[in-house]
Image: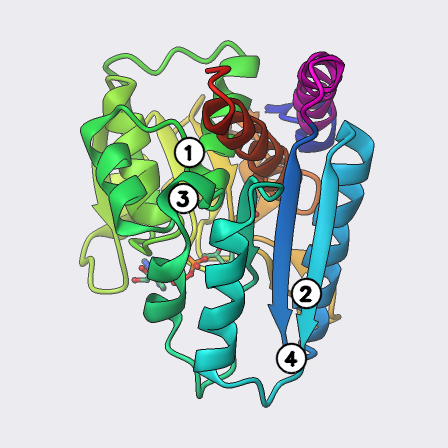
Amino acid sequence: MGKIIDGNLISAKVKDEVKNEVEKLKMKGITPCLAVIIVGSDPASRVYVNNKKKACEYTGMKSLEFALPEETSQEELLNLIDKLNEDKQVNGILCQLPLPKSIDEETVLNKIAPEKDVDAFHPLNVGHIMIGDAKLLPCTPAGVVEMLDYSNIDLKGKTCAIIGRSNIVGKPMAMLMVQRDATVTVCHSKTKNLSEITRNSDIIISSAGRKNLITADMVKDGAVVIDVSINRDENGKLCGDVDYENVKEKASYITPVPGGVGPMTISVLMKNTLMATKSQNGEA
Ligand code: NAD
C-alpha cells in the first residue's frame, strides 16, 4: 500500500516556518498585510476566504477583508484595487474567484500590482514562472512541489503526466515540474490516449475535476499519485479525480482528498505574502 502524503501536516510545517519569519519581520516593525476581496455570496468562496483569514491570523499577518455585493460594477472593483495597489500598508492583494459574470476576470487580475499579486495570476508573474525566476509562486502547483519535496521524492528524469491545462493549475504545474527536471506530458479533455500516458508515468498529477477519472488500471506499480481536484461524490462527500481506495494499493505515494493538496495552497499563499512583504521592504 502507498504512503499517504499528509497535506495537513506539511501545510502546518510551512505555516510554522512563515510564522517564524513573520516574527522576525515584526521585530523590525514590519507586519505583512494581505487584502482579500470577495464579490457576491458564493458559499465555497466564503469558506476559502475564511480559511485564508485564519491562516493570516495563525502566521501573525494582518488581513483585511473587502466583501462587496454581487451587483458591484467592474469599475468599482478596479477602483478598490487601485487604492490597495497604492496603500503602502498592504503587501498582498487577492481577489477571490469566481467573480460575477458581469465582471471581466482577466481585466481585474491584470489590475493587481504584480509585486502584490500573491496568487501569481498577473501576466508578468506568469512570465516569471515560465522563465523559472518567479518570486511569487503559483499557489496550488507550488504546494504540490512542496509535498513532493517533503516526501523526498526525486523528480529528476521522472516521467510525469499532468491532467488538466488550466492557467491556475495544469500549465504552471507543468512549468514547475519541467524546472525540476521531470519529463512532462500535459493531458486535457482532447487527449486521446490518457490511460496509455498515465500507465507510463512515474508521477501522475490530476486536476481534471472529474471524479473516478484515474482508476487503478491506469496507474503503474509504484507511481506517485497527486490528486489536486475537489469534487463531490453522489453522497455529497468531497473526493478527487482518483479512485483512491484502489489506486492506493498500487501507488508508492498518494494524496487524499480532502487533506491532500487543498491545505498546501493556503500555505503557499502565506509564503507569497511573506515574500511580497520582504521584497517591498528591501528584505529579500
Ligand atoms: P478547469 O476546469 O479550469 O480545468 C480542468 C482541466 O481538466 C481542463 O484543462 C480540461 O481540459 C481537463 N479535463 C477535463 N476533463 C478531462 C478528462 N476527462 N480527461 C483529461 N483532461 C480533462 O479546472 P481547474 O481550475 O484547473 O481546477 C481543477 C480541479 O482542481 C477542480 O476540481 C478544482 O476544484 C481543483 N482545484 C483545487 C485546488 C486546491 O487547492 N486543491 C486549487 C485549484 C483547483
- The residue range painted magenta reads 10-30
* Cα separation between marks 4 and 1: 27 Å
As helix, strand or loop, the secondary structure at mark 2 comes to strand
At 42% from the left and 33% from the top, the residue drawn is 136
Label 3 sits on residue = 120
Q: Which residue is mark 1?
A: 137
Tell me which numbered mark, 4 or 3, is placed earlier along the sequence. 4
Q: Quadrant of residue 102?
A: bottom left
User: Which is more N-terminal, label 2 or label 3?
Assistant: 2
23 left or right, relative to 107: right
26 in the magenta segment: yes
Circles 2 and 1, Cβ within 8 Å, touching? The answer is no
Return the disc, 4 or 2, that comes first in the chain's sequence: 4
**Amino acid type, label 3:** Ala
**Up-down relation of residue 16 to residue 205 (above or below):** above
Dot 4 corresponds to which residue?
40
Determine whether label 4 and label 1 are within 8 Å by CB: no
Between discs 4 and 1, the one toward the N terminus: 4
Q: Amino acid at mark 2?
A: Phe
Separation of marks 4 and 2 at Cα, in angstroms: 11 Å
Q: Position of residue 86 (x, y in %)?
A: 49, 51
Q: Nearer the viewer, mark 2 or mark 1?
A: 2
Give the crowd class for mark 3: few <14, some 14-19, many >=20 residues within 10 Å: many
First in sequence, mark 1 or 3: give its number. 3
Kindly state the secondary structure of the residue where label 1 is placed.
loop
Indicate the amino acid at tag 4.
Gly
Query: Disc 3 and disc 2: Cα gap in Å?
Result: 20 Å
Q: Amino acid at mark 1?
A: Leu
Which of the two discs, 3 and 2, sits closer to the camera? 2
- Tell me the residue that label 2 is attached to: 66
